[in-house]
């Protein structure tokens, strides 16, 4: 085997290892992305609650904190909540295939989405909550449902703990240190400090960039990553 062949072998092996590493990272991100933390800093997992959102529910913000867009629009997500009152702002969105002939350049689907809705959950440590509503069977029902949306939040015992209503545009912000977990960077005056590690900052920046990227930009990046 010549030196050239050895060089090519190691080059190809290195590319394969890099590709496999990226697959592992993406796989880890995919599994981790089903859980979404709704605050900055650390908190005791045993004291947090979880709100399960189906694919139709698009959570926009929690307690005034806007949440990052995710790689896929059809993910069912679990939102981790701190104990106490949590205001969740969301929309209900469904997609329906168009029947008949679709003209060139025309969308092949109908998108039905509500105006922003809001619900305040008094979260208890260790509790799991979920959205409860009657899903529409067709597009006509979906449009009627979107114009007069109603949904409840139920706990693990299927007891109604809160009901959603149209959002008035005002956010309930976490402004006190009591609502912020340890290490969140919130000082005694309620301000946000600058104690954010470099790794956390980089990860959040990457998430934000990916969330803002178009589908074509994402495909281009993935092609580049595996070349």
Image: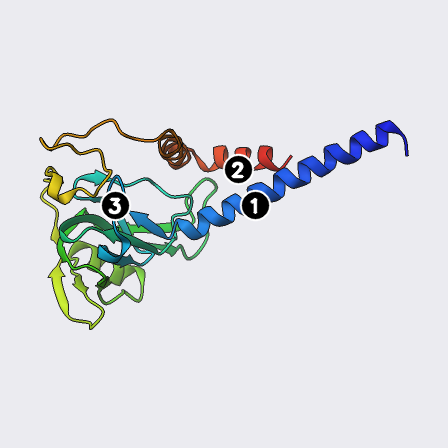
Q: Secondary structure at mark 3?
A: loop
| Image-based side of 2 in relation to 52, left or right | right
State the residue at coordinates (20%, 43%): 181
Quarter holding the C terminus is top right
**In the rendering, at what x and y percent does residue 2 appear?**
90, 30
State the residue at coordinates (40%, 54%): 98
- Observer able to see residue 43: yes
Work out how far the residue at label 1 is from the one at label 3, CA to CA, in angstroms.
Answer: 26 Å
State the residue at coordinates (34%, 31%): 197
- Residue 78 marker: none
Local crowd size for mark 3, using a 10 Å CA cut-off: few (<14), some (14–19), many (≥20): some
Of mark 1 and mark 3, the one earlier in the sequence is: 1
**In the rendering, at what x and y percent does residue 123 appear?**
16, 57
**Residue that badge 2 annotates:** 219
**Residue that badge 3 annotates:** 38
Of mark 2 and mark 3, the one earlier in the sequence is: 3
Residue 34 in the image: above or below residue 68: below
**Residue that badge 1 annotates:** 23
Q: How many marks?
A: 3
- Residue 160, picture quadrant: bottom left
Quarter holding the N terminus is top right
Judge depth for marks 2 and 3 and give the one in front.
Answer: 3
Residue 217 in the image: above or below residue 33: above
Using the image as rendered, state which of residue 92 and residue 67 is in the foreground: 67
Is the Cβ of the residue at disc 2 closer than 8 Å to that at disc 3?
A: no
Is the Cβ of the residue at disc 1 closer than 8 Å to that at disc 3?
A: no
Farthest-out residue, right = 1
């Amino acid at each position: 085997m010549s030196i050239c062949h050895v060089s090519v072998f190691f080059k190809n092996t290195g590319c394969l290892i890099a590709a496999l590493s990226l697959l592992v990272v993406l796989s880890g991100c995919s599994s981790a992305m089903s859980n979404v933390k709704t605050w900055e800093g650390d908190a005791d997992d045993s004291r947090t609650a979880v709100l399960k959102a189906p694919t139709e529910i698009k959570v926009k913000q929690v307690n005034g904190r806007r949440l990052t867009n995710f790689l896929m629009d059809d993910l069912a997500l679990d939102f981790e909540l701190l104990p106490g009152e949590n205001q969740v702002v969301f929309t209900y969105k469904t997609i329906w295939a168009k029947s008949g002939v679709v003209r060139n350049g025309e969308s092949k689907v109908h998108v039905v989405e509500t105006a922003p809705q809001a619900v305040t959950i008094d979260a208890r440590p260790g509790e799991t909550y979920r959205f409860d509503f009657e899903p529409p069977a067709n597009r006509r029902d979906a449009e009627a449902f979107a114009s007069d949306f109603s949904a409840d939040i139920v706990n693990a015992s299927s007891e109604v703990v809160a009901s959603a209503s149209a959002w008035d545009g005002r956010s309930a912000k976490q402004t006190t240190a009591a609502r912020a977990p340890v290490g969140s960077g919130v000082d005694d005056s309620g301000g946000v400090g600058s104690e954010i590690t470099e790794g956390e900052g980089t990860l959040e920046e990457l998430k934000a960039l990916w969330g803002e990227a178009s589908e074509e930009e994402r495909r281009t990046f993935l092609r580049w990553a595996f070349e």
